[in-house]
Amino acid sequence: MKNSEIIKNLSLDDKIKIVTGQDFWYTKELKNEGLKSLLLTDGPSGVRKQEEDIDALGLNQSIETISFPSLALIACSFDKDLLRQYGEYLGQIAKSEKVKVLLGPGINIKRNPLAGRNFEYMSEDPFVSGKLGTAYIKGLQSQGVGASVKHFATNNRENQRFTNSSNIDERTLREIYLSAFETIVKEAEPATIMSSYNFLNQVPVSENKWLLTDLLRNEWGYQGVVVSDWSAVKRRAQSLKAGLNLEMPGKGEATLTEVKDAIKNGQLDEHILDVSVDRVLTLMKDYQIKEEVQSYDKETYHDFARELARKSIVLLKNENENLPLKPSSLGLIGELAENPRYQGGGSSKVNPYHVVTPLGAFKNQQYVYAQGYNINNHEVDQQLQQQAVKVAQQNDQVVLFLGYPESYETEGLDKDSLSLPDNQLALIDAVTKENENVTIVLQNGGTVLMPWADKVKSIVETYLPGEAVGEAIYDILTGKQNPAGKLAETVPQRIEDVPSYLTFNQSKADENYREGIYVGYRYYDTKNIETQFPFGHGLSYTTFDYSNMQITNQESSLKVSLDIKNTGNIFGEEVVQIYIGNRTSDIDMPFKELREFERVALEVNETKTINFEIPHKAMRWYNENRGQWQIDDGEYIIYAGSSVEDIRLEQPITLNITNQTTSNQIHEDTYLSEIVTRKEAFKQSLEQYNLDKIIDAVIENPELTSIFENVPLRSLIMVNIDIKIVRDFIDAANEELSKQA
């Protein structure tokens, strides 16, 4: 039956119930139309389906399933194919549990490393989040399970997340915080988008018509369902008018009464309600369970969790080829080797199938273990530390397993420090005094400051690597897997260096994004601030050579090609990163921005040619004064590198792609410096009005140059040139330009 026929036969109460959660996780069932309730459940790091005693933050037990790595780690793979495969695996598990909408992925920008939910998000860069998120969603939805992209939008802190307002100028909003969502909407067509708790520029996101309707639907063309984050809706009638279709879990009779009263009082047009009913009905039809549920082999899926983690783990430092491990004796130190952190807290927490600890993974190797510290106590335990020191003294190589306690990072609160606990910092000092071959393996949801980095030979970043934590770490440390992960966020040297340091969490009511577009590497790179480890950084046990970059300007894109060769002695993978620097637009711009990447696998001595197609729109920026995107003709620099700082090749290109001539015309406010630069284009007009002599004088006299180059044409009256002559020259010069075009 068509939606319109169903809606026509529904009572007002039933319409409201359709756009309101039936209970905590289910939509309303429509038995007469053969439409069963849809089960929506959490899924950032695995399918978190609760069987009874439901709650929002996963405090009660959920089904046993695979605990996959956090998105903070998986994004470090920079592997679109791997992300699509991950989505497929999640979809298969969801299907087996009759879950029809999985609440993920989280793609909010990592604006500040203190943000408590950063472990659920992919990157500080919207291009990375958009492309990897698109791959994930395509994989998930290929299995007949809908995605719910979250949290739309500007949910970049946890403290006061229900009430604080993210205050952002439109250029920053569009270029940074909405960009990944736009990519995913247009390229992946997600079944649902989850609106966030916070306010945007003083308007609750759940009631923000500009965001949910004008932009999302009318401008981007989104056709799916906008669902609220759980209990985010304060005024249901207002949220319906704004374009929020499905309220979860709903407020029962209170929602019914509020919406009915709003319609009765003329505050809400019933047609607006019908539009949301229509969209939810379409979702229900598209994602009904149409086949017999199949079970899945948990061992196979556990093995994939291991593959995900080991392909994503980042080798940050490896002095003197300290890794892979090759000791005659080995010491493993740290409670996290025995009781690892492998997942985040809150709504992403799943009940794991099979956790393999690092100690368990090393069971077939000779090693000596010392606990070293208590993970949930910051104070130094002298006895534990002395045991660790003894292990360091008696073994050739030492691996220190360190990281944040779970209490440091979870949904619902932000961190107040990026330092490891005091007892772990003391342990680093004690162990490195006794052994020079120390590797630190980190387990953490978000960025860790590393003032101790110079004291150790190697550093391995695993973020929260899922239930195969020990196996994945073992594979990296022993060389069974050659590391190829790259940082999807910057590791600063100090919290004070973070661009949002002065404003983050400074007000309970307002979060002011004064740093604008200068988020993450865009800030550090542009301002030339030294980082601990830059965006895109990650080492390998082999080496790669970049060469032969070629750039061709095509009708609607740039074709960039280059050769990459494995110059080491083992198989390896490299993430080739393409950045573009805008040197032409008359507005502040980051020094360079990531515009493409590709993960490349190479055998020893193998060379591959990598081709990138970068659309011209990658050069666009948002002009707030005009209220539109803008591309400018002129010079751009194309960079290819292994990180934002490790640039191997670069080449300038001058683009003339807009076919606009009006922008080249001059006017009374055109500065004399531009006339000097373009004097050949106006040669006849300059001579006709005797202005060529002034230009020559400016060029020949350095004192005049510094004064007159910063003077507009209309101000030439200061040297006794009549304003009429200036205006006649402008007309003649623009006519001369038009003839040249």
Image (spheres, grey):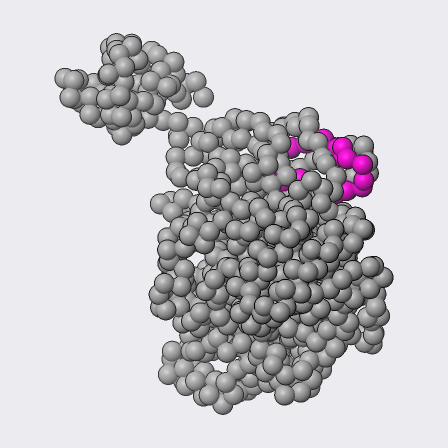
* Residue depicted at 42% across the width and 74% down the height: 238
Q: Nearer the viewer, residue 699 or 481?
A: 481
Residue 396 is covered by the magenta coloring: no
| Viewer-closest of 363 and 707 | 363
Foreground pick, 28 / 718: 718
Q: State left or right for residue 221 relative to residue 86.
A: left
Task: List x then y, in percent, for residue 262.
Answer: 41, 82
**Residue 353 quadrant:** bottom right
| Residue at image coords 49%, 49% | 493
**In the image, 709: left or right of 501?**
left
Against 204, is 543 above or below?
above
Which region of the structure is painted magenta? 560-578
Q: Could you say where residue 523 lies in the image, as x and y percent from the top left?
A: 46, 45
Residue 169, given in percent of the width and then of the height, sits at 38, 53
Q: Residue at coordinates 67% horizontally, 87% vertically from top-left?
A: 52
In this orientation, which residue lies closer to the viewer: 268 or 508?
A: 508
Q: Main secondary structure of the magenta part?
A: strand
Estimate the x, y position of residue 661 in percent, counting from the top left. 43, 28
Q: Quadrant of residue 639?
A: top right
Residue drawn at x 36%, y 63% as measured from the top left: 506
Q: Is residue 577 visible?
A: yes
Q: Quadrant of the N terminus?
A: bottom right
Can residue 310 be seen? no
Asked if the magenta segment contains residue 566, the reply would be yes
> Quadrant location of residue 553?
top right
Is 315 placed left or right of 533 in the picture? Answer: right
In which quadrant will I find the C terminus?
Answer: top left
